[in-house]
Image (tube, rainbow, N blue to C red):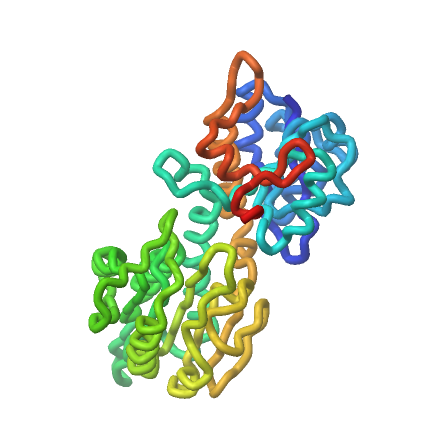
Amino acid sequence: MRIAVLKELAAGETRVAATPETVKKFIGLGAELAVEKGAGETASIADADYAAAGASVGSRAEVLKGANIILAVQGPDPAGLKGFADGAWLAAGLSPFGERARVDEYAKLGLEALAMEFMPRITRAQSMDILSSQSNLAGYKAVLMAANAYGRAFPMMMTAAGTVSAAKAFVMGVGVAGLQAIATARRLGAQVSATDVRAATKEQILSLGAKPIFVETVAGIEGEGTGGYATEMSDEYKAAQAELVSSHIAKQDIVITTALIPGRPAPRLISDAQLATMRSGSVIVDMAAESGGNVEGSVSGEAKKIHGVTVIGAKNIAALMPADTSALFSRNLFNFLSAFWDKEQGKPVLDEEIGNAVRLTQGGKVVNERLLA
């Protein structure tokens, strides 16, 4: 069983899909590891470190030759994939909805493409979930980005010259990223509040010492979709939420937005009119900017001033911390493949529940129900 680890070629991508730690673990299962030259350089991992862990290091053509499994962070360009074994697996974050044409190309190449972001959110798959592991650190970094752009201090400071008031931070969307953002803002000394469309998150917000901001006038809307994701809200709820947010957001210094709906554009949480009510010098980090944005006017990869508010359109935040995010991403991949490793066959054999969830292509065709619906 030959496993190839590719160097990421996408602009701004600094992570790598395997570390010396997981290389050793795969070799322990009986696999042969081949790592593309320079794959770990931007994550502070030298080729020599991979070699010391037992992997061979070579060109893309060399590592792909005869590969049974190909590991990557982002889906690689199909044009650069040649020489792998028949029916080889490709396990990576494949952006199935955003890169559907690329998925079709993987099928034509005969690859069995496994989208790690389609991992079902069930108990036994938690250690395999790249969305959670990467979002956790991204939520932390988003608050640091806001703090860096904010022209004032986060904690309250009492000095001989007077008192500095604590910053007020508001987190919109209390998933993995939002929870970490709350915790990080609290550690930095801010007064933190948070909201979500899922009523069940109220207890989580309180447990982190933040103030929950929820619509109480619209009954019976829980907002809990399948797999722990939020669902699209009714027009009634949206109107009530907009009214609540408008009154609250005008008093905030920092806002972190995290709301995403799989396979659909990010929901609009903050309008231009609401931005205009915020104090000059306030900062918003839109973590959903790559998916269309939660904030009107935000642009992925850019920081811009709107009505005196700095709106940061976050792009691939996980790539800003490549050493840690690569370590977690690579463990997700190892946990996934090792959980299904068949010692007799010397390879992983997926079951139906998880296999059918993550498998996009097989036998030259696109087979995932979510892409065929």
Q: Position of residue 300 (x, y in %)?
A: 57, 68
Relative to 1, say whether 132 is above or below.
Answer: below
Q: Position of residue 151 (x, y in %)?
A: 43, 79
Q: Residue furthest top?
A: 344
The residue shown at (21%, 70%) is 216
Q: Position of residue 52 (x, y in %)?
A: 62, 28
- Report the number of numbered marks: 0
The residue shown at (37%, 49%) is 226
Relative to 16, say whether 280 is above or below.
Answer: below
The answer to whether 262 appears left or right of 55 in the picture is left
The answer to whether 245 appears left or right of 202 in the picture is right
Q: Quadrant of residue 60?
A: top right
Q: Nearer the viewer, residue 204 or 111?
A: 111
The residue shown at (38%, 47%) is 227
Q: Quadrant of residue 247?
A: bottom left
The answer to whether 322 appears left or right of 2 in the picture is left
* Residue 43 visible in rendering: no
Relative to 8, say whether 365 is above or below.
Answer: above
Q: Quadrant of residue 165?
A: bottom left
* Residue 107 visible in rendering: yes
The answer to whether 8 appears left or right of 353 in the picture is right
Q: Position of residue 306 (x, y in %)?
A: 50, 84
Q: Nearer the viewer, residue 288 or 47?
A: 288
Relative to 293, say whether 112 is above or below.
Answer: above
The residue shown at (63%, 25%) is 54
Q: Quadrant of the N terminus?
A: top right
